[in-house]
């Protein structure tokens, strides 16, 4: 009987948080190193620049990078509220973040957990943390379609869509296609595909150079009937701002890459809020 009461209290705590969030988006990729966290962070800042109140949840338990990219390394969760639950970190006025990195005393210490522990902590992110009222919650997942994205979607219950990130390389698209199928099996709509590192503009002549050649993004979009939200070119300033914890879309807003990101977010808002 007591166990049932505890379970009910846990579900109520999760539901309270879910009721405070209008739209929930999950950023996924089938392959690592495609810039998924970069897209998630800059999408959050671009949404904030559009007047939205945004939360970003990092469920990459083994390799969290959101803290560094948001400039909140070393910061811990806010003090507990009146009901005893801590709050996520306030990055700027209308962006809040939660990552396992904010709970680990030593950033060099690896997290060596099996699936059940990871599933448990993901539930705790929504159960034991008191999230503020949000227009959007963006969830940054590790690569693949395993424990973390599965647990997130099951915990959030109703996800408004997935954003799939890939490079143009055909090898990357093999895995991206799996994430599209995964979304379908989880009954989550695909908002669209973001083609990252689409090309590089030569600094001398200005000509575009296709470093990651491939036509897989368009083919995947055609095969599965999903949209391409946009293509983001390679820009060295993305690396600089990510390492320094600054928002690329704000600091370099006039660049081609930042404008592409802003355009992608405009399409996301139109699709989600239609």
Image (tube, rainbow, N blue to C red):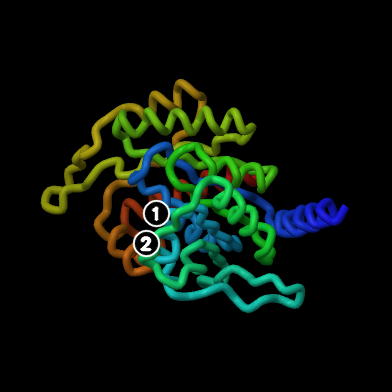
Q: Earlier in the sequence, mark 1 or mark 2?
A: 1
| Percent x, y of residue 116 | 58, 47
Label 1, residues with CA under 10 Å away: few <14, some 14-19, many ≥20? many
Q: Secondary structure at mark 1?
A: helix
Q: Secondary structure at mark 2?
A: helix
| Percent x, y of residue 38 | 39, 54
Task: Please name the residue shown 32% across and 52% down the image.
Answer: 256
**Residue farthest left in this picture:** 204
Task: Please name the residue shown 42% across and 26% down the image.
Answer: 220
Q: Nearer the viewer, mark 1 or mark 2?
A: 1
Query: Taking 87 as reference, is 9 above or below it?
Result: above
Q: Is residue 234 left or right of residue 224?
A: left
Q: Quadrant of the C terminus?
A: top right
The image quadrant that residue 85 belongs to is: bottom right
Of 126 and 211, the residue lying toward us: 126
Does the CB distance between marks 1 and 2 fall below 8 Å? yes
What number is the disc on residue 64? Answer: none
Give the labeled residue for mark 2: 248
Give the labeled residue for mark 1: 38
Label 2, residues with CA under 10 Å away: few <14, some 14-19, many ≥20? many
| Percent x, y of residue 262 | 44, 53
């Amino acid at each position: 009987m007591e166990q049932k009461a505890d379970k009910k209290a846990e579900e109520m705590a999760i539901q309270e948080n879910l009721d405070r969030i209008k739209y929930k988006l999950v950023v996924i990729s089938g392959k690592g190193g495609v810039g998924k966290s970069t897209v998630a962070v800059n999408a959050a800042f671009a949404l904030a620049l559009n007047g939205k109140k945004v939360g970003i949840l990092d469920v990459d338990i083994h390799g969290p990078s959101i803290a560094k990219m948001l400039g909140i390394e070393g910061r811990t969760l806010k003090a507990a509220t009146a009901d005893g639950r801590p709050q996520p970190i306030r990055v700027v006025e209308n962006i809040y973040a939660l990552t396992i990195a904010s709970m680990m005393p030593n950033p060099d210490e690896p997290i060596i957990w099996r699936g059940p522990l990871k599933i448990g902590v993901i539930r705790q992110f929504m159960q034991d943390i008191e999230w503020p009222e949000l227009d959007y919650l963006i969830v940054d997942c590790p690569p693949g379609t395993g424990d973390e994205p599965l647990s997130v979607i099951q915990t959030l219950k109703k996800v408004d869509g997935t954003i799939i990130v890939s490079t143009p390389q055909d090898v990357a698209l093999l895995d991206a296609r799996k994430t599209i199928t995964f979304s379908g099996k989880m009954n989550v709509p695909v908002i669209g595909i973001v083609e990252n590192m689409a090309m590089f503009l030569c600094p001398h002549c200005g000509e575009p150079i296709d470093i990651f050649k491939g036509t897989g993004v368009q083919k995947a979009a055609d095969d599965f009937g999903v949209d391409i939200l946009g293509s983001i070119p390679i820009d060295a300033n993305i690396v600089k701002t990510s390492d320094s914890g600054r928002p690329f879309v704000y600091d370099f807003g006039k660049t081609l890459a930042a404008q592409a990101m802003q355009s992608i977010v405009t399409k996301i808002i139109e699709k989600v809020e239609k």
